[in-house]
Amino acid sequence: MYLIVGLGNPGEKYKHNFHNMGFMAVDEAALILNAKFKKKECQAITAEAFVSGEKIIIAKPQTFMNLSGESVRELIGKYKIPYENLIVIYDDYDLKKGSLRIRAEGSAGTHNGMRNVISELQESKFSRIKVGIKDDFVNIPIINYVLSDYKKEDSELFATVTQNAAKAAITIATGGGIEYAMQKFNSVK
């Protein structure tokens, strides 16, 4: 069993924020796997899919970004998911917009939601897929930037990168492995 978690903030006003790249990616994963978000559990809304007999749970924590780890910890506990079967997708201000970076483990960097996930789990050895959002031509505080909407002219770019993030997560969860996903989908600019 795998757990794919997208980090973001619930609510319509955050829907097109840079900070919601994780939600956008898991929406794509659910679409690809023909899964519907209909279950409320562990402070999240979840969807379930089965691929070759393997159960995949897709989750969007509803705790708001900085407390995402609470939901992830509860889901891991409820479903007895080993850390190596956890995949977290989130935005990364340290990567140029449109980039995708996949890692098997690591730190939270500047991301408070990921920092909370690591703190709640007391573990950093799980897969993460980072969607780059940094625009070198914007010079505002990070907190203001991540909570702002991306530009309409970047809609196609972010649609493509979140779809690739979803495909990478599905590749890992269906036996392709993280090394293969890294080779196929990493696109750091």
Image: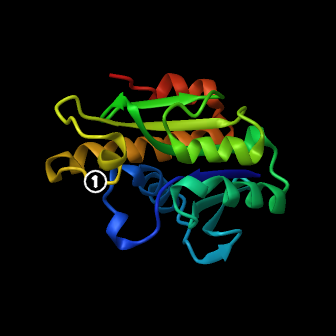
Residue 50 in the image: x percent, y percent?
68, 60
Pick whichever, 168 or 115, lies toward us: 115
Residue 10 in the image: x percent, y percent?
46, 68
Task: Say which residue appears at 62% left-offset and 51% top-offset.
Answer: 4
Q: Is residue 170 visible?
A: no
Task: Say which residue appears at 24% left-offset and 40% top-offset.
Answer: 140
Residue 75 in the image: x percent, y percent?
74, 60
Q: Is residue 139 visible?
A: yes
Tally of numbered discs: 1
The reply, left or right, for residue 153 in relation to residue 68 is left
Task: Say which residue appears at 63% left-offset and 30% top-offset.
Answer: 178
Image height of 123 relative to 105, above or below: below
Image height of 9 relative to 109, above or below: below
Amino acid identity at mark 1: Ser
Tag 1: Cα neighbours inside 10 Å, few (<14), some, or many (≥20)? some
Q: Given the current orientation, which residue lies at the most extreme front position?
A: 141
Residue to which mark 1 is pinned: 148
Residue 18 in the image: x percent, y percent?
34, 49
Image height of 14 relative to 126, above or below: below
The reply, left or right, for residue 141 in relation to residue 44 is left
Coloration mode: rainbow
Task: Say which residue appears at 42% left-offset and 41% top-offset.
Answer: 164
Give the quadrant of the C terminus: top left
Image height of 151 relative to 60, above or below: above
Identify the element where label 1 is drawn: loop
